[in-house]
Amino acid sequence: MYQLSINQTAFLQNTWQKKPQVFRQAFKHFADPISADELAGLACEEEVASRIVLTTEQGNNWQVLNGPFTDYGQYGEQNWQLLVQALNHWYPDCQPLIEAFRFLPDWRFDDLMASFATPGGGVGPHIDQYDVFIIQGEGRRRWTVGDTGCHQQRGGATTSPLIENFTPIIDEILEPGDMLYIPPGFPHQGFTLTQAMSYSIGFRAPSQQELLSSMADYLIDHNQGQQRFTSTAEPQQPGMVPAAQQQGLLALLSELANAPQLYQPMLGKLLSQNRFELDLCEGETLSAKELQQALQEGAIISRIGGLKVLLLENDSESRLFINGESFAFATADLPHAQTLTNLTSIHSDTALGMLQSEGMCCLLRQLLAQGYYYLADDE
Ligand code: SIN
Ligand code: CO
């Protein structure tokens, strides 16, 4: 169990998405959810997204190697860092750490990235388009954070995520249990003082590009959005596109943003999808009776790591969005659907209550068969 000791109301009001801040002992008696050896083992797996960043002796150049990795001996005792994305998909034991951040909505949550760093290791100065909470596990790392503004890409490169050195507004050493929050756009850099584990809890929101491209996909897939521009007056000059017509054309787009029956399924699909591969279960096909029996024997129904289960407020239909798919339910089952969105593990009593509804029973069996949920022992 991880208890986040910050004033959440004050954080949401004053800090979230506004400014970087260090929280000393955000987690009292913090225990690493994974060991360095286990992390290194995961980075040997093909499906797990991992990278090693090597820093030069001078500390001014960084080389990225993409996983999977087979042998770490060649990297020595210092100046490198291993980073593993979406640890929460592959390592269910880290779920309690994520639960501590569920005061923020699930749709924004991106992943838990874990890092093992040797002294001198770091990824270099960079800017993320994410909100990130960096929690220090074992060891010590020094973090500098600069202000937003115009930051040059390193060496004039256009593709590198690295930027030139910046003037810090925060320069602090994090110890186990300390946490640094950084909103999007603030340059930052971590420098490792002693062998260290750290955990980055990332949150992101879709860009206009992503929203428009999702909307276009949705309209094409469902053969919608056929409306075209019409006008009552035309310009005097044949080569001129009048301002009123420019606005009229773009108004066709804003009409989409005012049509919930179009944008709600698009948003549900987009926001319930994950950027990283999910570790889907094989899928268990159970009859209603078999499921009931398993629950009566004390099994719990668990969600696979990273799965997003969402409801849209004021949705035009009663449906859950799970991993980009929509699942209809009877309006009377809304409280059960809310249980599915809120709980990552559903205990037997609650699940047995859900089985009272035939529709919910069907839905649970379908989710188990698709490998989104699995039956587990109650610990
Ligand atoms: C790191 O742990 O050094 C990288 C994390 C980040 O900068 O977001
Ligand atoms: Co970063």
Image: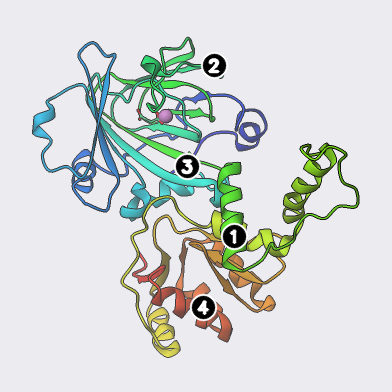
What label does residue 268 carry, if any?
1
In the depicted structure, whether residue 359 falls above or below residue 28: below
Residue in the foreground of this view, choosing between 186 and 245 = 245
Q: Which residue is mark 2?
A: 150
Task: Name the secondary structure under disc 3.
Answer: loop
Residue 107 placement, left or right of 251: left
Q: Residue at x 40, y 33 (%)?
A: 135
Residue 230 placement, left or right of 280: right
Residue in the foreground of this view, choosing between 297 and 106 = 106
Q: Which residue is mark 3?
A: 3
> Looking at the image, is mark 2 or mark 3 earlier in the sequence?
3
Q: Nearer the viewer, mark 4 or mark 3?
A: 4
Identify the image quadrant of the C terminus: bottom left
The reply to whether residue 222 is in sight is: yes
Q: Nearer the viewer, mark 3 or mark 1?
A: 1
Q: Residue at x 22, y 42 (%)?
A: 67
Residue 140 placement, left or right of 242: left
The quadrant where residue 11 appears: top right
Measured Cα–Cα span from mark 2 to mark 3: 37 Å
Q: Nearer the viewer, mark 2 or mark 3?
A: 2
In the depicted structure, whether residue 321 falls above or below residue 28: below
> Looking at the image, is mark 1 or mark 4 earlier in the sequence?
1
Q: Nearer the viewer, mark 1 or mark 4?
A: 1
| Type of the residue with mark 4 | Leu
